[in-house]
Image (tube, rainbow, N blue to C red):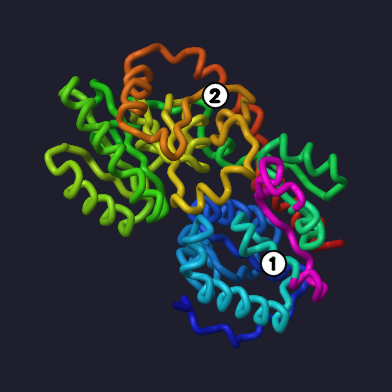
Amino acid sequence: MTKNTSLNTSLNPTHNNSPVFAIVVGEHSGDTLGAGLMTALLQKYPQAKFVGIGGPKMDRLGFESLFTMDELAVMGIFEVLGRIRRLLYIRKTLTNYFINNKPDVFIGIDAPDFNLTLEDKLKQQGIKTIHYVSPSVWAWRKKRIFKIEKATNMVLSLLPFEKAFYDLHKVPCTFVGHPLADDIPLYSDKVQARAELNLPEHGNVLALMPGSRGGELTRLAAPFLQTAQKLYQQDDTLIFVVPMVSAKRAAQFKQLHQQIAPDLTLKIITDKTQQVMAASDCLLMASGTVTLEAALIKRPMVICYKFNTLTYHLFKGFVKLKWFSLPNLLANKSLVPELLQGQVSVENILPLVKERLYQDQMQLNEAFMSIHQQLKQNASEQAANAVEELYQS
């Protein structure tokens, strides 16, 4: 559904101090990046206009969303196929809108399967394009880098090894660091976080984090809740908290909780994920950007992921990586345990969580601190500088 009905409204003519920046994001992590970028650009251009698809954080800064962000939050080829007509309609509508109402710069944030095609069409019409967050071309489908080169004037990468890959292929790329490393303090106070969330100061807390998308939450809720049940049988002092990104996901999890483990006591907390992680002793979590947040908050974790079965079998032969989680990729070694697809079982999860709940993690924290310092680069300001340079070129 369209968020507002201004698709036929022309963008105001731009002036030196009132540029128009088009932005499209597809999920909550993109909303955070977009809000940081908007804030930095507004420091440079207080009269700037922002339009496209944004999330709630961007909307609060005055972003004009033409469609809801949730419409793009689909992962996996078969999940996408179920929504393909709607996604194509949205992309075509945006393409026509931006061609008819040319922004000064278009910035696609993540969502590469959606944004790169959109960027390509806009660049062909003379619109300057940036892709913020590199697709995982270094991991699979490496030839996509030529599509990226064709579609964009610049890639903004969050991770240093991505910049090296683009340089190797002579494709314009700027390493900006990661905004999360700027926003999250080098030390996260567990006692303070527990007080803010009204959790007991003492006792072990395990966070269950089965994902921010509906599909992944459905696939991981059962093994996570069943593991929690086993842990509670062995230690009835354990406290379980479940951070959810939205009321919609919280309602979905509550329903699964009642079906799978109705007798298990847990606390669901909405829209305070970082605080919950800081308050916890260990995190049982889905893979994704949130694992980087966990590393920056410096809490031990067990990372799991389950794709749609057909999606997994279709793509497993194409991915050539030792690890799939960001903490391990950044460290270039196995810092945290990963379980993928069939490995995601109570039998495998249980000992890994117990080890991290009850053992010293000093060496792990040192490795996390090294990652934090590497990524702390004032990312939003660096990204805004790159946008400004392209805008003025």
- Give the amino acid type for the residue marked by disc 2 in the picture: Phe
Q: Is residue 217 left or right of residue 238?
A: right
* Residue nearer the viewer, 351 or 99: 351
- Is residue 11 visible in this depiction of the protein? no
Above or below, 95 relative to 251: below
- Give the amino acid type for the residue marked by disc 1 in the picture: Thr
* Residue nearer the viewer, 286 or 365: 286
Reading the image, the residue beneath label 1 is: 117
Task: Please tell me whether mark 2 sits on a helix, a strand or a loop.
Answer: helix
Q: What residue sits 32% from the left and 59% below the top?
A: 248
For the C terminus, the image quarter is: bottom right
Q: Quadrant of residue 205?
A: top left
Above or below, 5 relative to 41: below
- Majority secondary structure of magenta residues: loop
Reading the image, the residue beneath label 2 is: 368
Q: Quadrant of residue 42?
A: bottom right
Q: Position of residue 203 (x, y in %)?
A: 23, 21
Q: Is residue 110 magenta?
A: no
Q: Position of residue 57 (x, y in %)?
A: 48, 58
For the N terminus, the image quarter is: bottom left
Which of pointers 1 and 2 indicates the residue nearer the eye? 1
Magenta span of residues: 121-143
Mark sitting on residue 31: none
The residue sitting at the bottom extreme is 8
- Is residue 151 visible in this depiction of the protein? yes
Q: What residue sits 53% from the left and 27% below the top?
A: 186
